[in-house]
Image (cartoon, rainbow, N blue to C red):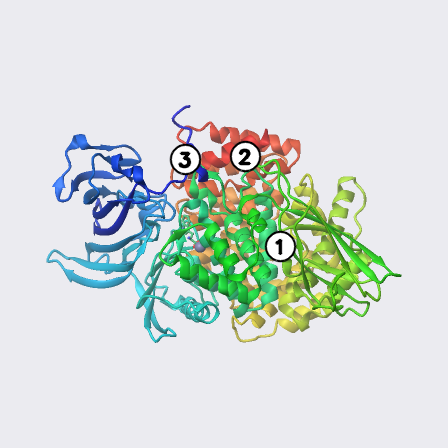
Amino acid sequence: MDKGTPKAIRLQDYRPPAHLIDTVDLQFELGEEVTTVRSTLGIRRNPDRPDAAGLPLTLDGQRLDLVSVALDGTPVAPDRYTVTADHLTVDQVPECFSLETVVRIKPQENTALEGLYKSSGNFCTQCEAEGFRKITYFIDRPDVMARYATTITAEKARYPVLLSNGNLVASGEHEDGRHWARWEDPFPKPCYLFALVAGNLRHAEDHFRTFSGREVTLRIYVEPGNEDKVDHAMRSLKKSMRWDEEVYGLEYDLDIFNIVAVGDFNMGAMENKSLNVFNTKYILAKPETATDNDFLGIESVVAHEYFHNWTGNRVTCRDWFQLSLKEGLTVFRDQEFSSDMNSRAVKRIADVQGLRTVQFQEDAGAMAHPVRPDSYVEINNFYTPTVYNKGAEVIRMIHTLLGPEGFRKGMDLYFQRHDGQAVTCDDFVAAMADASGVDLSQFQLWYRQAGTPDLSVATAYDEAARTYRLTIRQTVPPTPGQPDKQPMHIPVVVGLLGPDGADLPLRLTGEAAPAGTSRLLHVRKAEEVFEFVDVPARPVPSILRGFSAPVKVKADVSDADLTFLMANDSDAFNRWEAGQILGGRILLGLVADQQAGRLLDLPQSYVDAVGAVLRDADADPAFAAQALVLPTEAYLGTQMDVVDPEAIHTVREFARKTLAARLRPDWLATYRRHAGNQSFSVEADAIGRRALKNLCLAYLMALEDEEALSLCLGQYHGATAMTDVIASLQFLSNSNAPQRDEVLAGFYERWKGEPLVVDKWFGVQAMSYRPDALERVTELLKHPAFEIRNPNKVYALIGGFANGNPVRFHDATGSGYRFLADQVLRLDPMNPQVAARMMGPFSRLRRYDAARQALMKAQLERIVATPGLSPDVFEVASKSLEAAG
Ligand code: TRP
Ligand code: ZN
């Protein structure tokens, strides 16, 4: 095999490490030209590896300039150790010893943003998943847990703030202008949780008193000038700490908790022990610069990283195949936190929408993998919606199966058994099963089988026998490497609505009395029949309430029944869902009309159903704002055998315009009612009202008439909250308004000093569905504010176009594909993680027509043929080509 082809790591090859590291002493000498890292490791043979006695010590290390190696204080002779591109191997090591290495690195040249790097002149680290090996030689795997002491030395004037994990135990100054700080973390941790920050930063400080009375100092560090944008993050942190105590009995375990916000970051944020590092996007916010979604995102990401302290840090992963052990569980916890802080139904709808568009697409593409993958080439490619969001759905199903008390008992047992350990998803499920007595053996298939299960539901009412029968069939589609699937254990929550719209009490055949109006049905076999008795009239079924399982449902429910559910279902999620199913059905019917060249016509019954929701909008504006959105283009695509991006876009725009025209007075009146000058707040209710108002404006702007345009311009110029500014900017950017260019230029001038706001400006233009979008995006690549080295800029402009603009990206000429491949190849040598993340659309090529497939394939072939490709991009490109056949 040629040496350029990276090989897969497999779960079945897991073995415990031959050596363990108990203590780490690190000394960083941070410099402009070179940074020196001196490491002293306390190492011993692993008693769980009886064969280890004869084995050399193998440490991971990449791009390290090795200066010296000493064992128990004595330099190691050069013939006793070997250095390769990835490892340092030391022969004939005793059972227990210390190893000192000195290496030199150049953080200022690190554009991959993994390991130690610089962002705006400040030093920071990102070690998950395998970045620690770019800082020093180490056994870089999460089942090696050690106690860390870290001394940082740097020039005081440039780097007044020196931070690492744990407690500050000593600090001082040298005579030459350098200073130093020593940090000690009392909790053993895997090296992926190590962090260091050195820079010129300002901080906000607050305090939290834990339930046992510990006073914790909370600090958020930002670059000078951003001190006015940390209040929301700080409030979110305190709420998270309180919530984890109240809901899970989990208390913070140190006297200090630091957050640092940096502008250059590959992902959202990182849960390093007591020193979380965040993308500025998930910390900085004030109403003038951040949208409501930004505020909500900050609340949930701050919570997510804080919650990792127990689910991830105190109990960590044995290996990276177990990533969902911490990520699925922690996403579930942050979702529940946000539900408790805001509106539960609205949060659930948003999460399901995300899952259905992004994760379902992944499950149907070349990169489909189980929640616990069996193999990977590059672990960074597996920080995916499947591991995170489907993983969270798997935890949610366990919660549904066990009930809240059973689930809490399971969590308690999990911590009791595994605090301080590196464990597996099986260990988590075992704790849940043992604590509750619920059999989860079949359920574990959710961790092993990829692909979105299909459920079909057939209904039958027997008027004479007064019985109602649901026949539920499941199939799990084949995915790469998994041609045959077994039936899963699927929790399906159902309700039945009587003719008056109220829930019927539910009694299954064989039961003595009705038990509740929402029932959990266990679907375990390929086909199951559930018969309800004593049903007085033909009911309307409400299936998969709360989206109780991450599946696709096809049920024989009529359009009239869906309209009935939209108006009456007691389950708010399914009230929304009924509208989505109905809207989806109608739009997909129109897509077929469009493809066949028939005239488009939106049924008046559908317009009426939407009108009814609109006229009732004030009862729950946040809910209405979600219920009035047509199924997205991406979601409609997932419902088709062959995605037709042009037809989908044409039809959806047609439906939007038709609804806008026929319900114009209602959109207008609702807009006016909610457009009044309310004082700004980020309470769920205020967010809901702004969302509804801006949705009304979106419909009105679909018509692009004088009045809509003047309302939109009025809002643009008059609004102070970024939510309202950006909404109107987006509508204008999609429009042919003569003021369009002037407004866009003015926005940039006003906000060019705020990088996060400039990202929005790039995004709005990248996602504009005007035909000249790609031309504009190509121009913007040369804009002085665009930086290819900054992930947020790449995600906004290149990602916005590739993922947020299906109709222009999938242009039949292939221009979008060529553009994306160019950008991937340009990014790859600097930042392979980000380059690979841009490849998503290519991994779904099989979902498109033959002509588009061929065009995408040509670009993938060009990519794999490029010399020096990273394993990251190589893995996605080669798997996409394999699936293309
Ligand atoms: N563990 C982080 C989280 O909270 C994810 C993360 C942050 C990450 N930065 C990363 C993963 C860089 C891989 C690479 O979800
Ligand atoms: Zn996480």
Label 2, ligand 1: CB separation under 8 Å = no
Which residue carries the number 2 mark? 880
Q: Residue at x 57, y 61 (%)?
A: 402
Q: Residue furthest top?
A: 1
Q: Residue at x 50, y 49 (%)?
A: 387
Does label 1 or label 2 sit earlier along the sequence?
1
Does label 2 or label 3 sit earlier along the sequence?
3
Q: Where in the figure is residue 657, as x and y percent of width and height?
A: 72, 55
| Amino acid bearing label 3 | Ser
Q: Where in the figure is residue 440, as x and y percent of width and height?
A: 56, 53
Q: Secondary structure at mark 2?
A: helix
Q: Quadrant of the C terminus?
A: top right
Q: In what quadrant does ligand 2 lie? A: bottom left
Mark linked to residue 870: 3
Which residue carries the number 1 mark? 549
Q: Quadrant of the rendered structure where residue 645 is?
A: top right
Q: Looking at the picture, does residue 403 appear above or below residue 647?
A: below
Q: Quadrant of the rendered structure where residue 705 is?
A: bottom right
| Amino acid bearing label 2 | Ser
Q: Quadrant of the N terminus?
A: top left
Q: Is residue 241 left or right of residue 76?
A: right
725, 674: nearer the viewer:
674
Instruction: Bin the neighbour count of mark 3 within 10 Å (Cα to Cα): few under 14, some 14-19, many 20 and up.
Output: many
Q: CA distance from mark 1 to mark 2?
A: 28 Å
Q: Residue furthest left?
A: 175
